[in-house]
Image (cartoon, rainbow, N blue to C red):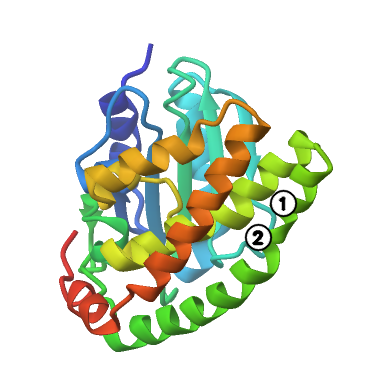
Amino acid sequence: MLERSSIVSAFTNHMKSTDYVLAFWEAGSTAFGRNDQWSDLDLYIVVEDNKVEQAGKQVEEIVSSIGGYDLVYKLPEPTWHGHFQIFYRLKNASPFLFLDIVIMKESSPDKFLQYAIHGKPLVYLDKRNIVKDDLVNSDAFLEKLKIRVANLKTTFELFKILVLKELNRNKGMRAFPYYFSMVLRPLIEVLRINHAPHHYNFFTAYIDYDLPEEICQRLQRLFFIPDLKGLRKAYAEATAWFQEAINEIDFEKVRNQLEKQRP
């Protein structure tokens, strides 16, 4: 079975010998020092602007050289972030160790290098000093959070009723999805704004690292619910907690947290 280090070495050797590849690094859980045996492999490649398609073909060749794949998915273009992105499940590796590969143009303004948000990448190649911390503009980010909080106040109040509607109909398969999307997700977003604003939209990713232990323990009780009676009780607690948490937001404290730029 292929190990993480063998895959990275194969890619690094090819990247270093390719003139148009300007930078190559690993991100994801590795950027936070949290990768384990269940982690996938997030690889980022920066190339000359007219070489994205050629780089995609080279990636395919590298994957073939290490044993090939049995599943592949390329994000339809234009992608939401503007970059080429493709996923491979390798034949000779753990299915958990699938590849998430992003190819970026040198001129692309956003290369996911805000360390406070995405962690500090593990750099394998950097010919033009591309891989450096793109410091988050705290003022701009704070304004975005203020707009988001205003929207959450309205949308939460409007859509939380969907859970009760389906509970009143005794329709659990309808009520539970609404509860997770319309109640728990915005609750967690508000808690993150209070405690980990750079990751306000991460939902449950890294939640046990970003939020205090007592909050995570309380949230767990709101996630694992056995029946509709339990759901009605959890709904009442979660909606009350949302109101408390959103009223507790102090944007000056949030600003102070945003100015801590390092992950």
Amino acid at the residue labelled 2: Lys
**How would you rate the neighbour count of disc 2 (Cα within 10 Å): few for under 14, some for 14-19, many for 20 or more?**
some
SS for tag 2? loop
Residue receiving disc 1:
164
Question: CA–CA distance between discs 2 and 1?
Answer: 8 Å
Q: In the displayed orientation, state which residue is furthest to the right.
A: 169
Q: Position of residue 156 (x, y in %)?
A: 60, 67
Nearer to me, 145 or 112: 145
Residue 62, relative to residue 257: is it above or below?
A: above
Quadrant for the C terminus, please: bottom left
Residue 28, relative to residue 193: is it above or below?
A: above
Nearer to me, 161 or 233: 233
Q: Is residue 74 visible?
A: yes
Residue receiving disc 2:
160
SS for tag 1? helix
Instruction: Please say if the residues under marks 2 and 1 sit with CB atoms less than 8 Å apart.
Output: yes
Q: Nearer the viewer, mark 2 or mark 1?
A: 1
Q: In the displayed orientation, state which residue is furthest to the top.
A: 1
Residue 47's tag is none
Q: Residue at x 29, y 82 (%)?
A: 251
Q: Residue at x 55, y 51 (%)?
A: 236
Residue 84, relative to residue 106: is it above or below?
A: above
Q: Position of residue 199 (x, y in %)?
A: 35, 61
Amino acid at the residue labelled 1: Leu
Q: Residue at x 80, y 37 (%)?
A: 170
**How would you rate the neighbour count of disc 1 (Cα within 10 Å): few for under 14, some for 14-19, many for 20 or more?**
some
Nearer to me, 93 or 13: 93
Q: Position of residue 124 (x, y in %)?
A: 22, 47
Horizontal placement of 250 versus 157: left or right? left
Q: Position of residue 32 (x, y in %)?
A: 23, 47
Q: Residue at x 49, y 50 (%)?
A: 237
Horizontal placement of 126 versus 78: left or right? left
